[in-house]
Amino acid sequence: DIEMTQSPSSVSASVGDRVTITCRASQGSISWLGWYQQRPGKAPRLLMSAPSTLQDGVPSRFSGSGSGTDFTLTINNLQPEDFATYYCQQASTFPLTFGGGTRVQIK
Amino acid sequence: EVQLVESGGGLVQPGGSLRLSCTASGFTFGDYWMAWVRQVPGKGLEWVGSIRQDGSDKYYMDSVKGRFTFSRDNARNSLYLQMNSLGAEDTAVYFCARGGRRFLQLFDQWGQGIRVTVSS
């Protein structure tokens, strides 16, 4: 199975900051990867498919990069609604696997 | 408006069974892969399995193989998860999710989730 490792597991930031989250696959070359946002008590929301294809309605302050085994989600100009947990997910090979999550907290 | 609504969750004793349903609306259900994803409260997301548009292919996570069964009824716009031999480790919120049009195994629509608690 492909293990997805996210870092950091938690980050504290202020409104207006830039936050970068990384996701690394344990093996192979990931052809399809997604980033999700989950607010407390809510279902996840697909933000983008890597490296950088935003879903409709996702603000442009979200961006992505990477290829192969290493991917990055960047949130520029952090807004109050961005404080949430973010997950990566590889969609290349079954079993599909998620990263452990990165919680973006208010500093 | 796309909607996915799960039902059938609740409290079940260890070793028991439960059947979850997911009713879809607002899109052509039979055109999409569907999946179940679960989440232990306070923990991360865990893919449970996926089912092809016509139900001909199903993929499961190892720990549920032989215990869980997916099915779908495209005429009823419904996805099902039959869970047998439930254990405490299956306690979670279960989400049904729709695979994307382009990236089939990235989930672009989610239900609100339904809680399953396995306890005596």
Image (spheres, rainbow, N blue to C red):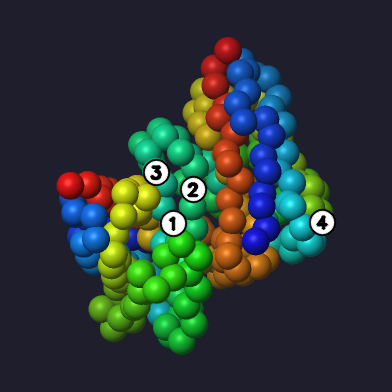
CA gap between label 1 and label 3 equals: 10 Å
- Judged from the image, the secondary structure of the residue bearing numbered disc 3 is loop
The chain that hosts pointer 4 is A
Q: Residue at x 58, y 12 (%)?
A: A107
Q: Is residue A52 above or below residue A91?
A: above
Inter-mark Cα distance, 3 to 4: 30 Å
Q: Please identify, in this view, whether the residue under mark 1 or under mark 3 is nearer the observer.
A: 3
Q: Are marks 2 and 1 in contact (CB under 8 Å)?
A: yes
For the residue labelled by badge 4, is the local secondary structure a helix, a strand or a loop?
Answer: loop
Which residue position is annotated with label 4?
A: A68
Q: Is residue A54 left or right of residue B18?
A: right
Is circle 3 on the same chain as circle 4?
A: no
Numbered mark located on residue B40 in the image: 3
Is disc 3 on the same chain as disc 1?
Answer: yes
Task: Using the image, name the chain to which the residue with label 3 belongs.
Answer: B
Q: Residues within 10 Å of mark 3 (few under 14, many from 20)?
A: some
The residue labelled by disc 2 is B45
Q: Amino acid at mark 2?
A: Leu
Question: In the image, which disc is placed on residue B37?
Answer: 1
Residue A33 appears in which quarter of the rendering? Answer: bottom right
